[in-house]
Amino acid sequence: MFGLDKKDASLLLIVAVLVAFAPFLLNPFPEGSAMAQFNAGYPDLMQRFVIFGIFAIGFNILFGLTGYLSFGHAAFLGVGSYAAVWMFKLLSMNVLPAIILAVITAGIFALIIGYVSLRRSGIYFSILTLAFAQMSFALAYSVLTPITGGETGLQLALDDPRIFGSATTADGNIPVPGLFGLEMRDSMELALGGWVFTFNFGYYFCAIIMLVAFYLSIRIFRSPFGMMLRAVKSNQQRLNYTGLNPRPYTLAAFVISGMYAGLAGGLMASMDPLAGAERMFWTASGEVVLMTILGGVGTLIGPVLGAGMIKYMENIISKINSDILHGWFAFLPDGLEDLVVTMIYPFIGKGWHLTLGIVFMLVVIFLPGGLVEGGQRLARLMGRKKAEQPKSAKTEPAE
Amino acid sequence: MGLLEVKDVNKRFGGLQALGNVNLSVAENTCHAIIGPNGAGKSTLLNCLVGKLIPDTGSVMFDGQSVLGRTPFEINQMGISRVFQTPEIFGDLTVMENMLIPCFAKRDGSFALHGIRSVMSEGELRDHAEQMLDDVNMLDKRNMHSASMSRGDKRRLEMAMCLVQNPKLLLLDEPTAGMARADTNNTIDLLKEIKEKRNITIAIIEHDMHVVFSLAERITVLAQGTPLVEDTPENIKGHPKVKEAYLGEAA
């Protein structure tokens, strides 16, 4: 199917089904129940899942295949966002030109940064990319304020030209991003019993783009180009003496992953038309590294899983507060309840980073291959159990 | 004029004269061995041929073109393949992928964007690679993870990776170092077979005299960075200067 072998095609299909039914899958608890706060099926968060999924898929093409660890990928995300918002300001509120320009701008930016940074490898490469990203952040935050909006960020205004669309809506508001008349924030709600499922146009738009991005990444992994990138990671010396020049290969991988980041940035701006310099801050670059490692470096699906996991924790765990904890442990005797709540409290709310850190450490130590390795081990365990069952069934009659 | 012509090459590392006025001519379709005691400059010379080092003075001509100032991948594209002292292969890749990479390099040059066509769809290259694997008796290992193979197999794979490119000149850096006698003999047979079958020129650096005398048609003896003698194996065997270089003046 689509030039994929059976295994990859079924993986793509599974991801497509999961993404299509995400509004159901992420909302397993009925509205108003105590567990409802663990529901992640609201548009804002689902959009973030797939957008950061795209970001991580692209990062994995560079880091997973070539082993070059970039610590500045957020710069491309930020550049993509700015480019998209500028399109909204100048051209029209249609998301297509915004996203296309975001990808192109990020690609050009990646070409320049990659050309310089890829002169070094290993830690020096990481530091160079980090330096470039921090320079971009500093520029966006101060010097380039006319282009980037500086501290307040780049926002839409009523007096923007928008030459191919209306500058204001009929009732005098700033128009919202859309695709040929369909607004990104359009949602349809479906109430089933105690459950409310939200189907958001913006989410499905991002989801389709993510599936295309995921499909392309599979094709890149299986192509001769992907094989060369893995060869770069494996043994650059041998590659050189085999008549291949590693530099253009790594640069191409860098630009492709920068364009993925730009795409993610463009989509972020399309969902919520503003862009701030903090998107380029080094912690944002670190986050995508965490996502990729958490999910499984060099695996196809890993980065998407990692992105989902981190965004889920960021949004769900950070929302738990001490009142909710007290509610959960109300069945305990008073003194014990306070003790348990005090012990858990540092890990929730603003302390979600602590939980993330612990999860990250556990994964790196016990599952170096990330969540994907965890899944594989689980599958093997299940497979072994299944293989044992018929055996015992056979031996029974003999007894 | 030989396929490879080294003229008056000098290389200095600080106060050490690693190579002093080296002249060497490797004729087409011969096997030329370079021997010498440790520190004689054999590896330095080899590195000057493949672009890893640039000689201070002198010239290195291959097939009528200078290799000086070219990068290793450019020199490989000219037709020189190198086998390393310790096998250099793509350990994270399968044996088949290891074989396909040199095939792509040969067909498409030092860089090519192949689009998103699958590696699987390259039938012609795969046949070519399988043929070569069959020649070195490794076809049954084609789906193996190459890092998990024995050292001998890695060596054979590396040689197959070089040969699949049909190089004009094959450079071997101690191809039997650390091998058991049986493996060494296998390697000698393999190299003899390859030479007869494919008419390629081989330059070999080797410590093992058994290997040298079974393969080489010409031998150059290096000592302290300078060629001592160049002659046929028969004449080298009893040469007094060679004995002196290897065993010291007392001998």
Image: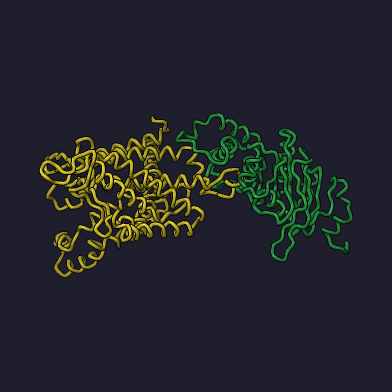
Chain colours: A yellow, B green
Which is nearer the eye, A115 or B134?
A115
Task: Indicate the quadrant containing the C terminus of chain A: top left, top right, bottom left or bottom right.
Answer: top left
Position of residue A196 measured from the top left corner of the image (x, y, whole percent): 14, 43
- Quadrant in the rendering for residue A135: bottom left
Position of residue A38 measured from the top left corner of the image (x, y, whole percent): 20, 51
- Up-down relation of residue A180 to residue A346 (above or below): above
Q: Residue furthest bottom?
A: A335
- Quadrant in the rendering for residue B171: top right
Position of residue B237 measured from the top left corner of the image (x, y, whole percent): 86, 50
- Up-down relation of residue A233 to residue A343 (above or below): above
Report if residue A24 is visible in the image: no
Report if residue A90 is visible in the image: yes
Which is nearer the eye, A13 or B35?
B35
Q: Residue at x 20, y 57 (%)?
A: A319
Which is nearer the eye, A386 or B246?
B246
Position of residue B29 measured from the top left corner of the image (x, y, whole percent): 76, 37
Q: Residue at x 85, y 45 (%)?
A: B232
In the picture provided, is B39 more to the left or to the right than A378? right
In the picture provided, is A273 more to the left or to the right than A13? left
In the picture provided, is A295 more to the left or to the right than A17? right
Q: Residue at x 23, y 54 (%)?
A: A316
- Up-down relation of residue B116 to residue A262 (above or below): above
- Up-down relation of residue B11 to residue A375 (above or below): below
